[in-house]
Image (cartoon, helix red, strand yellow):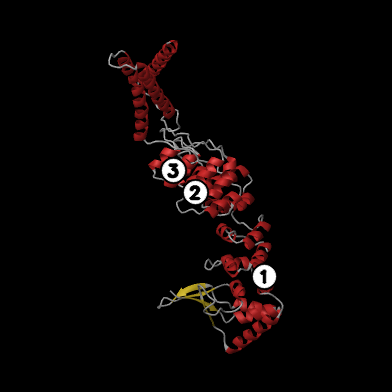
């Protein structure tokens, strides 16, 4: 659909009156100014006429390549065309900036017409949004200094641009028409991760309430799938510390660790207990494993996080890495000396140790049988050899059991009994070997 902005034939007269400060010209132009409205013809073309204050921001009709929404068309006759061309040629040669000219014209127009009424008489385009699009921050500041007020939507829109934000801060006591509605919109924007914390500080007296909103915003943003680290860093720069938690007891720090936002974690971790857990008992290292980033796991270990703590299901970070097939996390933990076995591996390790215990235990009856056998002549050699083998088997079993990978599980009484028998068997073998050795030396 084509949108046409009509420049009334009265505009050159108004402009001349403002430039020459001729009140008669100004009043004639204002009195004969056509009704401000938007009409649509049979071809669907919308034609709009705006209040004079809008035209003063453009000063003259825009060329087709300059306009974004409206196509600017004037109703000037030849004399008016000639006058405006001469006028703007003169203006361009002057030292005044475009904004300075606009402000001068607005000051003079304000003596004959209520500018606020003109601005409020039309919704599209929005006057203050037009100033933002044209980057007329000086005109914007002049309007606020002239006691013009902004709607909540206008405040929130202008706050996005630094130059316009400064003007709002200067006139915060007078420029906002509805502070409650503005606070509501700014809160919604803050929860979306946008930088409205400083605006809320100007609107709220309760600083604790503002801080809570900022913390809620940080948590809401870090939980999003498509969140980017710079947006989170912006919230941290505004003072967020990640003090609130979600329904599962996860803090913003835990979410940041899981998503691999190293810079965010470095900022937040100073405000948190490194032994913190969520409702499932997961530690920061569990979330670091989920990130599958070596740098995140290194950061957690450097920060003092215990990498061996298990959650309420008995699952350690290393076991979680194996479960998730997080190969980078698994390798990084192993580089820090942290390694565990699978359930099958644990059973094999227990089986290995107790087979060695069993073999060490069996050597005692074998030694006794060989010692009392009449077919064996050099019995002492068999006793010493059997004892040495038994000690080696027992020592190897004990070494494996004391190893880091041996599972810390409760053993059944049968295995405990086998362990006790192996202790007894090896002790008897040693005593038996010492007895034979003593007899050997006595000759």
Q: Which numbered disc, 3 or 1, marks the residue that appears first in the sequence? A: 1
Lateral position of residue 268 relative to residue 420, left or right: right
Mark 3, mark 2: which one is toward the viewer? 3
User: In the figure, is residue 225 to the left or right of 25?
Assistant: left
Q: Earlier in the sequence, mark 1 or mark 2?
A: 1
Near mark 3 (Cα within 10 A), the count class, few <14, some 14-19 or many ≥20, is: many
Residue under label 2: 260
Give the labeled residue for mark 3.
Answer: 330
x and y percentages locating residue 277 in the rendered image: 49, 36
Q: Secondary structure at mark 3?
A: helix
What's the residue at 62%, 52% (across, down)?
Answer: 198
Sequence-wise first label, 3 or 2? 2
Q: Is residue 263 visible?
A: yes
Q: Provide the secondary structure element on which disc 1 rests.
A: loop
In terms of image quadrants, where is residue 302? top right
* In the rendered image, the vertical position of residue 353 relative to residue 42, given as above or below: above
Circle 1 is placed at which residue position? Answer: 110
- The quadrant of the picture occupied by the C terminus is top left
**Residue with the most extreme left position:** 375
- Residue 271 location (% of width, % of height): 59, 41
CA gap between label 1 and label 2 equals 57 Å
- Separation of marks 3 and 2 at Cα, in angstroms: 16 Å
Q: CA distance from mark 3 to mark 1?
A: 73 Å
């Amino acid at each position: 659909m084509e949108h046409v902005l009509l420049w009334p034939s009265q505009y050159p007269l108004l402009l001349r009156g403002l430039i020459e400060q001729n009140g008669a010209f100004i009043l004639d132009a204002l009195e004969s100014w056509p009704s401000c409205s938007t009409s649509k013809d049979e071809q669907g073309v919308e034609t709009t006429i705006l209040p004079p204050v809008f035209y003063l921001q453009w000063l003259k009709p825009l060329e087709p390549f300059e306009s974004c929404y409206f196509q600017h068309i004037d109703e000037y006759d030849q004399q008016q065309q000639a006058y405006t061309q001469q006028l703007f040629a003169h203006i361009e040669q002057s030292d005044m900036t475009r904004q300075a000219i606009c402000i001068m014209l607005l000051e003079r127009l304000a003596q004959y017409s209520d500018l606020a009424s003109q601005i409020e008489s039309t919704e599209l385009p929005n006057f203050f949004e037009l100033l933002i699009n044209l980057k007329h921050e000086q005109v914007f500041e002049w309007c606020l200094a002239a006691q013009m007020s902004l709607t909540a939507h206008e405040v929130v829109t202008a706050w996005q641009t630094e130059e316009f934000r400064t003007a709002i801060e200067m006139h915060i006591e007078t420029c906002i028409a509805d502070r409650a509605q503005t606070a509501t919109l700014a809160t919604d924007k803050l929860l979306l991760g946008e930088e409205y914390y400083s605006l809320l500080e100007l609107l709220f007296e309760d600083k604790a309430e503002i801080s809570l909103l900022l913390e809620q915003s940080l948590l809401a943003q870090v939980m999003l799938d498509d969140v980017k680290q710079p947006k989170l860093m912006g919230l941290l720069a505004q003072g967020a510390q990640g003090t609130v938690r979600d329904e599962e007891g996860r803090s913003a720090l835990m979410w940041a660790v899981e998503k691999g936002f190293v810079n965010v974690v470095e900022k937040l971790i100073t405000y948190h207990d490194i032994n913190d857990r969520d409702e499932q008992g997961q530690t920061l290292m569990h979330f670091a494993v989920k990130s599958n980033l070596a740098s995140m796991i290194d950061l957690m270990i450097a920060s003092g996080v215990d990498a061996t703590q298990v959650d309420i299901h008995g699952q350690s970070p290393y076991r979680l890495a194996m479960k998730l097939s997080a190969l980078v996390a698994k390798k990084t933990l192993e580089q820090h000396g942290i390694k565990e076995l699978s359930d099958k591996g644990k059973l094999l390790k227990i089986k290995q140790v107790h087979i060695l215990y069993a073999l060490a235990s069996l050597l005692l009856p074998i030694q006794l049988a060989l010692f009392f056998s009449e077919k064996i002549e050099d019995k002492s050699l068999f006793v010493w050899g059997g004892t040495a083998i038994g000690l080696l088997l027992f020592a190897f079993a004990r070494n494996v059991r004391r190893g880091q990978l041996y599972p810390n599980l409760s053993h059944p009484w049968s295995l405990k009994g086998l362990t006790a028998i192996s202790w007894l068997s090896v002790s008897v073998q040693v005593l038996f070997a010492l007895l034979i050795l003593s007899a050997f030396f006595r000759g």
